[in-house]
Amino acid sequence: MKVLITDKINEAAGKIIEQAAQVDFLPTMTEDELVNIIPQYDALMVRSQTKVTAKIIEAGKNLKIIGRAGVGVDNIDVEAATQKGIIVVNSPDGNTMAAAEHTIALMLAMARNIAPAAISTKEGKWERAKFTGCELYNKTLGIIGLGKIGSHVAQVALSLGMKLVVYDPYTSKEVVEKMGAEYVTSLDEFWPKCDIITVHVPKTKETINLINKETIAKMKKGVRLVNCARGGIINENDLKEAIESGQVASAAVDVFENEPDINNCPLIHCTGNIVLTPHLGASTQEAQLNVAIDVAEQIKAVLTGGSASSAVNIPSLRPDKLEPVKDYMQIAENSGEFAMQISEGVIKSIEITAQGDLSELDIQPLEVAVLKGVLSSMLEGVNYVNAPVLAQKRGIDIISTRSKVKCNFAGLLTVKLTTDKGENTVAGALVAKDIPRIVKINDYEASIRPQKHMLIVPHKNQPSMIAKVAQVIGENNINIGSMNVVQKNDRHETESIMVINIESAVDPELLLKIEKIDGVHNPKYINLTE
């Protein structure tokens, strides 16, 4: 396996990945240059300079994982990667302190006119009065986004004697108030309360141009703005006009809409009080080392069959979610495969029901495993990354429920698959805590060991059925590993099923021969992952 590392990432990353794959360090490349060489690589690791476009991802026929040595992933087409089944990872914690400290540094530099005062002094001037600033003490700092970086900024701001107002729809009022801040539920309420505003949110459809001419007009006259998050969250043209008109007293910006090419950025021509830095938020020796090590460890783990700790496009498989249910992942996937392979027609819905101990857990990882099992039985290239996307594109309804009805197992997962031609139910469980078994097939109670090659043979309850089926299988040089004959609880029932574990695949001709046996109807070959 081969891994490409670009964008001047700390060499410690290469030393880690070299334990699992060959590593090539190359300088930042254009889209066309990457398209030409990416087919030979299994993984790609970048910082913010490289734009990993859909064209590059499409060309990366062997790519399994793309790593961004930093917090954001806006330079990676995550949707394209997800559809291709490629894991995208980042390092959400590696540069938290660096970014938070840079935010505070810019806020102080902006308030105390550090940059222009330094230039003036180096020119031999003594202009104390010209550079009179303002104190942060007792000012109200508005924080948009109380994640890890925003939270650390809040802590430091409180220690400086500032008041805090927080807008974050994903954080509870209790959390905000516990830290000593005021919680607001709308931006219209937020804007006029703040003397200084700092943003700590990702760049999304909802946050692009979040601060613009209209929202700036709702702020206090003389407000000060800081952006160490992502370029484009503050509209650059509107900010320039607001500074030059005096509506915004000053601003400090570390990120730009079209970086690194900022020659056409209106802010560099702004005549007002503005501090600009070239995306230095994560540029500390400690942060660069931390993010490089973090992402390299994840790439190494994925290439050696493990899981990523910070996969942005498979949050359901984060270690904290996966750990409680990891023993059920294989039986969940097998149950999905089994249900699909005994079904016919176009899938309409998949209903997943958790019972026993599973009803108390977050079963989102198991839902993904079921989807992978169902879809991989009909499509190629399905994995944990793209299974939910593929299901959504096909309009499949996913219904997940928790049942308090008692069952005979510590944990029971039931998959009900509905198509335009009918429905089938398969349930999986662990016996003795770690032995996977299929314990129900429609109305039949069972205890069947999932295996790569299996046959399901519905038949009438009549003499010699087992012998006749076994004879046909044997005549085709296929060895039978084990066989279960499953009957319904009703002793008057005339139908049973044989579940036969075999040691090789079967072709359609064998199924036709089995179906010709009197009393047999609609036999199926089942192929499960192990």
Image: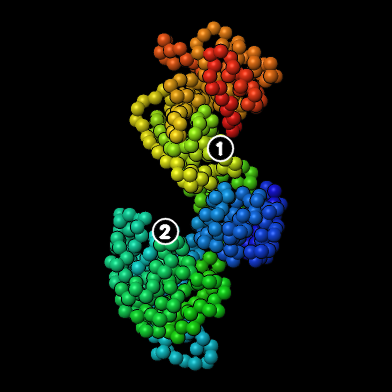
**Residue 60 appearing in the image:** yes
**Of the pair 203 and 200, the residue shown nearer to us:** 203
Which residue is label 2 attached to? Answer: 147
Q: Earlier in the sequence, mark 2 or mark 1?
A: 2
Give the image location of residue 232, x and y in percent.
46, 69
Secondary structure of the residue carrying tag 1 is: loop
Q: Is residue 130 left or right of residue 319?
A: left
Give the image location of residue 340, x and y in percent.
51, 32
- What residue is rendered at 60% in x and 51% in y? 65
Q: Is residue 304 left or right of residue 145?
A: right
Residue 362: quarter of image: top left
Q: Is residue 165 left or right of residue 526?
A: left
The circle drawn on residue 378 is 1
Q: Is residue 198 above or below residue 462?
A: below
- What residue is rendered at 52% in x and 28% in y? 342
Give the image location of residue 131, x and y in percent.
42, 86
